[in-house]
Amino acid sequence: MKKSQTKSILAMVTIDKELVLDAGVPTIVAKDKEEQEGIASELGRVLAGNVYGLKNGVIIITQE
């Protein structure tokens, strides 16, 4: 039987404050797309996680 691997979201990075609700995970609001990508990349390395961009512009970092 194949086991399902559930990943946890470690952090989120966005440039749109309107998308930030009570996320339950650390959420960083960047000033522009360049800063958002840089922060997400650094967090991915520091947290040893995977970085994913969503269609709505939010970047999430998940547990590896």
Image (tube, rainbow, N blue to C red):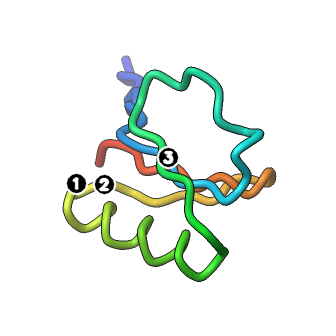
Which of the two discs, 3 and 2, sits closer to the camera? 3
Mark 2 lies on residue? 49
In the picture, measured across the screen, residue 1 lies left or right of residue 47, that is: right
Badge 2 amino acid: Gly
Question: How many discs mark residues in the rendered view?
Answer: 3
Identify the residue shown where x is 56% and y is 64%: 30
Identify the residue shown where x is 41% and y is 24%: 4
Q: Earlier in the sequence, mark 3 or mark 2?
A: 3
Tag 1, which secondary structure?
A: loop
Quarter holding the N terminus? top left
Q: What is the CA distance from the residue labelled 1 to the residue labelled 2?
A: 5 Å
Residue 18 picture location, percent across and down: 77, 40
Q: Check whether the beta carbons of the residues at disc 1 and disc 2 lie within 8 A of each other.
A: yes
| Rendered image: mark on residue 47 | 1
Mark 3 lies on residue? 12
42 w.r.t. 6: above or below: below
Tag 2, which secondary structure?
A: strand
Which of the two discs, 1 and 2, sits closer to the camera? 1
Identify the residue shown where x is 69% and y is 45%: 17
Residue 31 picture location, percent across and down: 61, 69
Q: Nearer the viewer, residue 20 or 6?
A: 20
